[in-house]
Amino acid sequence: MTLSVDHIHHLDRHLLGASDVNRPMALWVPSERITVHVIEAPAAPQRKWPELIPWLLEDRILQPVEEMHFVIGASSVLEDKKQLAVSVVSKQDLREWLRIADNAGVDCSAMVADYLALPFEPGRISMAWREGQFLVRTASDSGFAAEADLAWLLVRRHLDAADIAPRLSVSAPDESLIPDDLRADADINSADIDWQFAPIPESANLLAGEFKPLSGDLSPRAWLSSAALLMLALVLGFGYLQLSNGHLEERIASLESVAETSFGNVFLGSRAKPEAIRSSGEQLLADLFKQRESVEAPLMRALTGLDALMSNCDCELQTLVADSAGVSLTLKNAAKVNARTVNVPGFTIERQDVDELTSITLRKVAK
């Protein structure tokens, strides 16, 4: 499968076959949900920027810092000072876009603001009509999306602030959308944006930090490793029980014979009675059967049933508690987890989402 590109609003146009499920795609996402802030690079070491920058921008954004996702993009130098372009988007928007992609059978590798799909060249502002709004690209790493009235107001500010006014390229279905005073000097066409062939700038990828996609080559995670070890232990345990049960009777009979003939030659007094030896053997056999019953216990079935829930969930296991009443686990980034796909006889499954954490409980049904 090859990596493809399209706008997230166009995923319903793709006809996916069985072999296309979870195919990798890079997606353009609505620019009106994203803001780009240019700030002076902090004096702290670069490794601390992801922690500092959200609080440096606290006064510029209208939502709590903890609800927003910050991505440090391209850097530039202005008056001998390093400037950073920081993209800010709501975590809720990112989760919703990832959910839409997952429902469409897409394994999203990148999400980029759609104004960057417009062509750019120095000294030119590019504009394109998209579903009732104008996309505007003013520089290699800056732009915006807005309704027509606001878009023209902001474009005029760019034109007035420039020492040499940049040229204006506009793609619009109707020239009447362009103000009269700008129409004469603008390069106008009616071409649509080719989302599938527009180059994706990886430096503007919003899927960074906690939303960074995991490589398909690294799919075995800690949960899968633990599940594999558990299954291996179960197989070896059952194999051991089968072999032990076959030879146990022979060992007991041999021990009775050896004990009866040898005890009197080594120790004075009465010999060990075969009944006592048989009792010890039966106790050992009973212990082995208890071990097998514990492996087949409802709690163990609940743990093995969680394997289907956790496979390829791209989530992080925070806590796991198991007791006689059932199993409870807490997950982070559990957007892909679908508890309805798990059926463990004798247990009910409950899911609760709180902020970024998801609690899933398998509770034993009372008989």
Image (cartoon, rainbow, N blue to C red):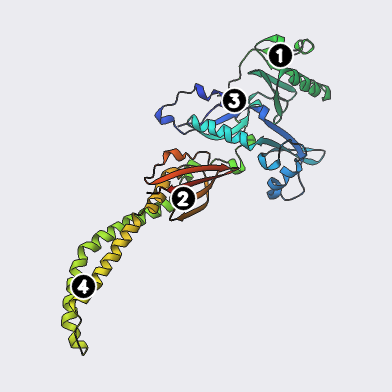
Q: Is residue 286 left or right of residue 327?
A: left
Q: Which residue is mark 1?
A: 187
Amino acid on which the number 2 mark rests in the picture: Trp
Q: Is residue 85 visible?
A: yes
Q: Which residue is mark 2?
A: 223
Amino acid on which the number 3 mark rests in the picture: Ala
Q: Which residue is mark 4?
A: 278
Q: Which residue is mark 3?
A: 198
- Mark 3, Cα crowd under 10 Å, few <14 / some 14-19 / many 20+, is some
Select label 4 or label 1 by which is in front: 4
Q: Residue 153 in the image: x percent, y percent?
A: 78, 20
Q: How many marks?
A: 4
Labels 2 and 1 touching (C-beta < 8 A): no
Mark positioned earlier in the residue sequence (2 or 3): 3
Marks 2 and 3, Cα distance to the nearest angstrom?
Answer: 38 Å
Q: Is residue 205 visible?
A: no
Mark positioned earlier in the residue sequence (3 or 1): 1
**Up-down relation of residue 326 to residue 60 (above or below):** below
Q: Residue 182 in the image: x percent, y percent?
A: 77, 13
Amino acid on which the number 1 mark rests in the picture: Asp
Select label 4 or label 2 by which is in front: 4
Marks 4 and 2, Cα distance to the nearest angstrom?
Answer: 44 Å
